[in-house]
C-alpha cells in the first residue's frame, strides 16, 4: 500500500510540474508582449516598461519560471494588475464560494444518482428502467442555466423558500449561506446526476453478468443481496472516475451558473480576468484549477486501491 501511495504522489508532483511549465509557456512565452496585451494598443513606452518590470519580464525565462514556482510554493501568486491587490487573497475569497458550491453540488449528484442508477439496473427492461433512462437523457439535454432560471422562478419568486441570487457570506451564518448555494447546487447537480446515474446503471449491469455474481446467486443469495455484497464494490471503479471528473468540472465550469445567481466565485473571477486582460490572475487561477483537477484524480486513484485491493499491486 505504501508503494502504491508513493507512486501516485510522485505522479501527482510530476503532473503539476509539467502543467506549471505549460501554463507558464502559454501565458508568458507566446508571440507578442504580455505587457502590450494587458495595457492595450494606446499604451505609452514608459507605461509598458514599468509594467514589464512589475511583471518581471526583463529577466531570462528560466529565471522567471523558477521565481514563479518559488512564489507558488510560498502562496504568493503576485499582484493583480486590475485590482491592485494580492492574487492569493482574490482566489481565497472566491474559493470560499466556489469550493463549497462544488462540494454541495457533488454531494447532491451522488445522493440523486446512486439510488436512481441502482433502481434502473435492478429493473432492467421494465417501464421503470425506460422512464428513468428517459428522464436522465432529458437531464443531460436540458441546459443547466435554463433549469437554474426555472428554479429561481419556482423556489424564489413563487414559493419564496430560497433566495434568487447573491451570497450573504459565511459570517451571516451557516443556514443563510447554504440557502444561497442550494439552488445553484441543484442546477449544477441535475445534468451531472443524470450522467452518473447512467454510468452507475451500466457498470452495475456489467458486474451482474460476471461469473462470480452467478456463483453467488447459485449459492442462494438473493438478487439484491448479491448486488450489495459482491457487485456494488466492483461496479464502483468507473463510477469513481466519473465522480472525480465531475468535481473538477463543478469547480471550474460553473461560470454560467455563478452569473445566473450573482455569485462571485472562482469561475466569475477567471471570466473577468480574461475580459480585463489581467494575465497574472488568469495564470494563477488556471494553476489553482489544474492543481484541483490533478489532486482530485490522485484521490480517485487512491480510492481505486481501497475499492479493489488488486490495483495496489500494479
Image (cartoon, rainbow, N blue to C red):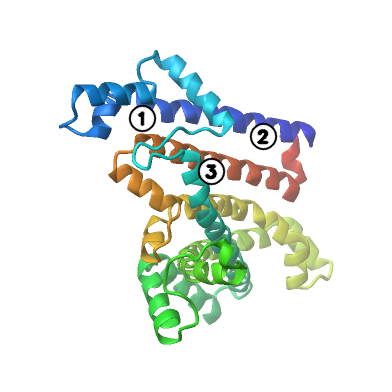
Which residue is farthest bottom?
159
Could you tell me if the residues under marks 3 and 2 are in contact, i.e. CB atoms within 8 Å? no
Q: Can residue 199 be seen in this view?
A: no
Q: Which quadrant of the structure image shows residue 217?
A: bottom right
Could you tell me if the residues under marks 3 and 1 are in contact, i.e. CB atoms within 8 Å? no
Q: Is residue 17 visible?
A: yes
Rounded to the nearest whole Å, what is the CA distance between mark 2 and mark 1?
A: 28 Å
Would residue 18 be found to the left or right of residue 60 on screen? right
Image x and y of residue 308, in percent: 73, 48
Mark sitting on residue 293: 3
Mark sitting on residue 8: 2
User: Closer to us: mark 3 or mark 2?
Assistant: 3
Would residue 152 be found to the left or right of residue 223 on screen? left
User: Looking at the image, which residue is at 33% across and 48% down?
Assistant: 272
Q: Is residue 229 above or below residue 299?
A: below
Rounded to the nearest whole Å, what is the CA distance between mark 3 and mark 2?
A: 14 Å
Q: Which residue carries the number 1 mark?
A: 27
User: Looking at the image, which residue is at 73% across and 44% down?
Assistant: 305
Label 1 environment density (alpha carbons within 10 Å; few <14, some 14–19, many ≥20): some
Image x and y of residue 252, in percent: 46, 50
Amino acid at each position: 500500500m505504501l508503494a502504491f501511495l508513493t507512486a501516485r504522489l510522485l505522479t501527482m508532483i510530476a503532473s503539476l510540474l509539467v502543467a506549471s511549465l505549460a501554463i507558464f509557456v502559454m501565458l508568458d512565452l507566446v508571440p507578442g508582449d504580455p505587457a502590450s496585451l494587458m495595457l492595450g494598443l494606446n499604451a505609452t513606452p514608459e507605461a509598458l516598461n514599468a509594467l514589464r518590470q512589475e511583471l518581471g519580464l526583463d529577466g531570462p525565462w528560466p529565471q522567471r519560471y523558477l521565481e514563479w514556482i518559488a512564489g507558488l510554493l510560498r502562496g504568493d501568486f503576485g499582484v493583480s494588475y486590475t485590482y491592485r491587490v494580492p492574487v492569493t487573497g482574490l482566489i481565497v475569497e472566491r474559493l470560499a464560494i466556489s469550493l463549497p458550491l462544488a462540494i454541495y453540488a457533488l454531494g447532491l449528484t451522488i445522493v440523486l444518482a446512486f439510488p436512481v442508477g441502482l433502481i434502473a439496473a435492478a429493473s432492467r427492461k421494465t417501464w421503470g428502467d425506460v422512464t428513468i433512462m428517459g428522464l436522465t437523457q432529458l437531464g443531460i439535454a436540458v441546459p443547466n442555466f435554463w433549469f437554474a432560471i426555472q428554479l429561481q422562478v419556482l423556489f424564489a419568486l413563487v414559493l419564496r423558500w430560497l433566495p434568487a441570487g447573491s451570497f450573504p457570506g459565511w459570517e451571516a451564518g451557516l443556514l443563510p449561506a447554504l440557502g444561497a448555494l442550494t439552488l445553484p447546487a441543484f442546477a449544477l447537480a441535475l445534468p451531472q446526476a443524470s450522467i452518473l446515474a447512467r454510468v452507475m446503471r451500466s457498470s452495475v449491469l456489467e458486474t451482474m453478468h460476471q461469473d462470480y455474481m452467478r456463483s453467488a446467486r447459485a449459492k442462494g443469495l438473493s438478487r439484491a443481496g448479491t448486488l450489495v455484497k459482491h457487485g456494488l464494490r466492483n461496479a464502483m471503479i468507473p463510477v469513481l472516475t466519473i465522480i472525480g471528473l465531475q468535481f473538477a468540472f463543478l469547480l471550474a465550469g460553473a461560470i454560467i451558473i455563478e452569473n445566473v445567481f450573482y455569485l462571485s466565485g472562482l469561475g466569475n473571477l477567471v471570466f473577468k480576468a480574461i475580459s480585463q486582460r489581467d494575465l497574472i490572475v488568469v495564470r494563477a487561477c488556471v494553476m489553482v484549477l489544474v492543481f484541483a483537477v490533478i489532486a482530485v484524480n490522485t484521490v480517485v486513484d487512491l480510492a481505486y486501491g481501497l475499492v479493489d485491493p488488486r490495483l495496489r499491486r500494479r
